[in-house]
Structure formats: structure tokens, C-alpha cells
Amino acid sequence: MVVVIILGILAAIVVPRVMDRPDDARITKAKQDIRAMESALNLYKLDNFVYPTTDQGLEALVTKPAGTPEPKNWKRYMDRLPKDPWGEPYQYLETDGSIQIISRGADGQPGGEGPNTDISNSDLQ
């Protein structure tokens, strides 16, 4: 009987910690994806002297974008764009030479806490 009680106490302590691991893994994966896309965007800028516009988007890393500014030295920077760990596309904003790559987290909405927190390259600096 004492063994059953001890096992129950241990389960109450261990199970919540183990159950949080999938969220931690998804957050880590999102951070890795964002860092990889940021590196690819920096290579794009080195070759073309500007980042892709918000309208050109992250797609400019896998297919040559149309429109202005035309990337004259474009190369393929990624084979494919990843989706965030919750199955949504990453969001991209370019403003005055500054870029933001964002995952909206588990809920897909701006803001949030825990696994719903937005993850951005500006948070990873």
C-alpha cells in the first residue's frame, strides 16, 4: 500500500513535467526555423543589397520575386519554406531595412502566454 502511495506521489510530480515537453519542443523548433530564415534573408540582402519587401515575402527565399525592387543577383536561398510547428505559415514584415519573422504560437493569434506566445527573430537577439 505504501508503494502505491509513493508511486502516486511520484506520478503527480513527474507527469506534468513530461506533458509540457511537446510545447517546449515546438517552441525550440520555431526558434530554429526563424534563425534559419533570418540567415537566408541576410544572404539575400548580401546578394541584392536589400531585404525582400513585405509583399515579396519569405517566398523570395525559394522563388525569384517579381516586382520592385528586382533582385538582380537572386539565388535560391532555401529549398522550401517551413511551416511553424503548429502548421501555420511564418509571417514576415520588412520595414525600412529591418525585418521581422514571426510565429503566432499555438493559438495563431497575436500575443499570448506559454505555448501561445508569439516567437520573433527580434526576441532571439
Image (spheres, helix red, strand yellow):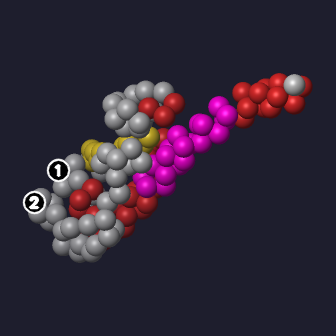
To which residue does mark 1 refer? 55
Counting other residues with Cα less than 10 Å from the Cα at mark 2, is it few (<14), some (14-19), or many (20 or more)?
few
Residue bounds of the magenta highlight: 15-34
Quarter occupied by residue 65:
bottom left
Q: From mark 2 to mark 1, how far is it between C-alphas?
A: 9 Å
Q: Is residue 48 shown left or right of residue 105?
A: left
- In the rendered structure, which disc, 2 or 1, sits on the residue that comes first in sequence? 1
**Which residue is depicted at the point 77% across and 27% down?**
8
The amino acid at mark 2 is Gly
Quarter occupied by residue 56:
bottom left
Q: Residue 100, can we see it?
A: no
**Which residue is depicted at the point 87% across and 30% down?**
3
Residue 50 in the image: state x and y as whole percent: 27, 60
Q: Is residue 63 magenta?
A: no
Q: In this orientation, which residue lies closer to the viewer: 94 or 14?
A: 14
* Dots 2, 1 in contact, CB < 8 A: yes
Disc number at residue 67? Answer: 2
**Which residue is depicted at the point 67% across and 34% down?**
15
Q: Residue 12, can we see it?
A: yes
